[in-house]
Amino acid sequence: PSMVAFANIIFKSPKFAPFMPIIVRLLFLSAGVHQLAFVIWSNVPGAIGQVQDVGLIFLSAMTASIVAYGEAHALPFHETLSTVMITITGATAVVGIFIMLMARFKVASLVQYVPVPVVGGYLAFVGYFCCVAGVSLATDVTLDTLSDWMGLVSLQSALRLAPMLATWLALHNTVHRISHPLGLPLVICCIPLLFFAVLYVSGHTLSDAQKAGWAPEPVPGGTQPF
């Protein structure tokens, strides 16, 4: 679920919709390589290299700015898409190289010179950014400015927000009240099963849910491999 959400946050422009299946698979692949590298080479026993959300702000901003540049200069979208993929891949690689160099030359302690309020402010904005992205994904309402939040004042948005909040409460309570390692994975698996159970009981099909905006519509060629 995290990788699917990250893909929708980074590539939030509607122009990426036809390419989302392959983009999601690429993110799954990169996350797998990321975690495998941590498992093999980390000196910490039991290390899990889960992809974090702190870089979403920069990746999303880079993607949005490149798309805006392409639209302003009437570039073919395949050129814009290629530029986006190369840019975010290169930027991620550069960050990784710098982190490895910091570890190699043992200068990671320089981080202690960064003021705590700066770190706290950045983390707070990451939380706000993820919250806005979640609400926007759930309601299909663009929330780029404060005035855009007025678009949530509708019955349709309220109906979309209700299951989102219920999911958040379920995950929040699971993390804080269930200590068993299988607790969170089971809840994550049960959430989509519950969605399809509600569809079945209510007499609706997946196609009905897709047309109503409750699930993404199929993309031509979306089942093709890499």
Image (spheres, grey):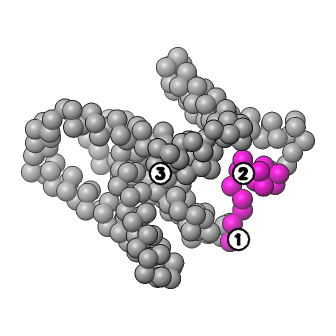
User: What main secondary structure does the magenta stretch of the protein show?
Assistant: loop
Amino acid type at image mark 3: Asp
Amino acid type at image mark 2: Gly
Quadrant in the rendering for residue 62: bottom left
Q: Is residue 85 above or below residue 32?
A: below
Q: Is residue 27 above or below residue 124?
A: below
Mark 3: secondary structure:
loop
| Magenta range | 206-221
Residue 220 within the segment the image draws in magenta:
yes
The answer for how far apart the CA atoms under marks 2 and 1 are is: 18 Å
Residue 193 or residue 66, whichever sits in front = 66
Mark 2: secondary structure:
loop
Residue 197 or residue 46, whichever sits in front = 197
Which residue bears the numbered disc 1? 220
Which residue bears the numbered disc 3? 144
Count residues near mark 2 (Cα–Cα under 10 Å), then give few for <14, some for 14-19, many for 20+.
Answer: some
Q: How many marks?
A: 3
Which residue bears the numbered disc 2? 213
- x and y percentages locating residue 45 in the rendered image: 32, 35
Residue ID at (59%, 49%): 141
| Mark carried by residue 66 | none
Q: Nearer the viewer, mark 3 or mark 1?
A: 3
Residue 161 within the segment the image draws in magenta:
no
Count residues near mark 3 (Cα–Cα under 10 Å), then give few for <14, some for 14-19, many for 20+.
Answer: few
Residue ID at (46%, 82%): 75
Amino acid type at image mark 1: Pro
Instruction: Identify the mark nearer the N-term, 2 or 3.
Output: 3
The answer for how far apart the CA atoms under marks 3 and 1 are is: 29 Å
